[in-house]
Amino acid sequence: MQKKLNRKYFLFIVPAIFMVVAFKFFPIGNAFRLCLYDWDGFSPEMKFTGFENFKVLVKDQYFWKALKATLCYAFGITIVKNIVGLALGLFVNKEFKGRGAVRAIVYLPIMISGFIMGQIMYYFYQYDGGIFNELLGKLGIEPIYFMQTGNRTILVVILTTSILHIGSTMLTYLAGLQRIPNELKESCRLDGANKWNEFIHITLPLLQPSIISSVILNLIASFKIYDIIGAMGAGGPDGASSSLTQLISKYYFSQFRAGYGATIAFVFFFIIVVIAWPINKYLNSKKVEF
Amino acid sequence: MRKKKGFRVWILLVAVFVCFVAMWPLYELLNLSVRDISDYSSRLAFPEVIKLSNFKDAFMNKQVWIGFKNSFIYASLTILLEVVIGSMAGYGLSRGSKRTTKSIKSVQMLIMMVPGVVTLVGTYALMTKLGLTNSLFALALLTAAGGIPSCSFIYMNFINSIPVALDEAARIDGANVTNTFFRIILPQLTPITITRSIMIAIGAWNNYLMPLYLINNANKQPIILVIRSAFAMVGGDRNLAMACATCTIGILPVIVVYCILQKRIIASQIGSSIKG
């Protein structure tokens, strides 16, 4: 009876499985197939070249630059977001009037497309007449090139993205903080611990589930960074601050090197799995119970 | 007593600073959108002459309305696909064999690691071949597929809290599994369905990467692409104000929905991260 029922219940999952197979697994398989071809993306002829694309990839300086930038983005954003997000989570967990409004306002920029936020930030970082350079000018400092400068641009993008998208991380930590039983804090205080000790020995260990999910989700999301970068005008010089997603779409859609673009896409997915999967496993193995 | 007061001032200062940082970009967007073309004054202060006619001009632009219509269709289709398929899967995962659920859950993380660009690159050729480019339905399919895994698990967590006894009672009354789900369980899911729908709609409204490459017919463009072309026409800052006004109008629905439902959205975000 239960077995028969289980089969019926499984039928409910089938459409979802179909969607995932059709639009997640199939594309990966197809990207891998395209890796083996020299193809422009639209013509009916595809030239089979074996692993030639991978050989090109190893020697492609743009791939290595984009990989470096993407790794910087992914880890940089994850680190900044988790530190600032935790601080903000602690802050909005305090009891004060209007904290609901503060939460809502900090979360607001996430509701707006990354492309639009990036486009607005572009006018902050413009060299000529940009808002930040105007401010610097008022302080008597020479204008700075923020964009198209490689490492500085990477730093600017990390900070901007982290701060604009801090709301979700803040809420993740807030959720974790609200789950910590008050008795634990009270007994800690009765034992004579100060605020700092309480934070290190009670709050932080009990926040572990939030830290795990926040780190891993932010890491995966930051690898995929795309719209905000392009709109902000980052990418240069000569590809030094462009992300892998940007590079893939450039090769596939603008330069009509679909086979090669697919090669990078496939390698990109592989890199995410190789980096994020062990981190996920490691973090989950340390889970605490309370 | 005095110390307590100082403490409060500290909180107020941080709160104001944090809100300022979050709102600054939007303030600048508004600031730039009410300027005259020839207004090159400081961008920090609000312009002296406020030109509201920019908004009127943006509203008169037919393309903006086409964009609204397409974004609305795109968002609705995505909601329909994701909520129906996701809630069904959530029910199956919650009530079905635990072994199946566990094995599906273990690949969920892997699915989440697939970047949108891989989905796009891997399906683009097929989409072109099947004539599915410039189709809002195809766009919705791709978007929904990205959201279905997490959507299913959110529903699963919610359905787990509904007693199985309810299903059993329905079965004794002669309802089959399908009827039980659609008649008994689904109505109970209304609160979560509403918040999910809002989040999906906002996600679709904001999606940029997929429409950018899948839609090139001007009549099928969602609003984000209309905003994009408005900014692309700015060129040497010639009519920045117009582009900013278009952009403001384009994000207005999102902001209005957010202002009305922010309590619910925030609560659902907190709730989903507890269970996740």
Image: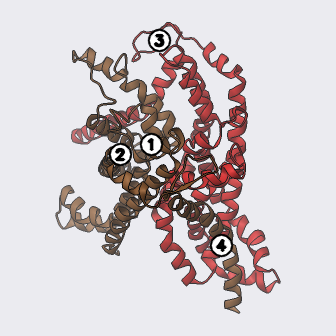
- Which chain is brown in the rendering? A
Q: Residue at x 45, y 24 (%)?
A: B28
Chain B rendered in what hue?
red
Q: Would you say B204 lies left or right of B25 here?
A: right
Same chain? Circles 3 and 4: no
Reading the image, the residue beneath label 2 is A66
- Density class for disc 3 (Cα within 10 Å; few <14, some 14-19, many ≥20) is some
In the rendered view of the protein, which quadrant contains the N terminus of chain A?
Answer: bottom right
Q: CA distance from mark 2 to mark 3?
A: 40 Å
Reading the image, the residue beneath label 3 is B47
Same chain? Circles 2 and 1: yes
- Residue B63, x across and y down, in percent: 69, 27
B220 in relation to B99, above or below: above
- Residue B2, x across and y down, in percent: 22, 38
Chain under label 2?
A: A
Answer yes or no: do the residues labelled 2 and 1 have beta carbons within 8 Å?
A: yes
Reading the image, the residue beneath label 1 is A246
| First in residue order: circle 4 vs circle 1 | 4
In the rendered view of the protein, which quadrant contains the C terminus of chain A?
Answer: bottom left
The residue lying toward the viewer, choosing from A77 and A213, is A77
Reading the image, the residue beneath label 4 is A13
Q: Would you say B105 lies left or right of A54 here?
A: right
User: Outermost residue, right direction?
Assistant: B174
Element marked by disc 2: helix
Type of amino acid under label 3: Pro
Q: Would you say B157 lies left or right of B8 here?
A: right
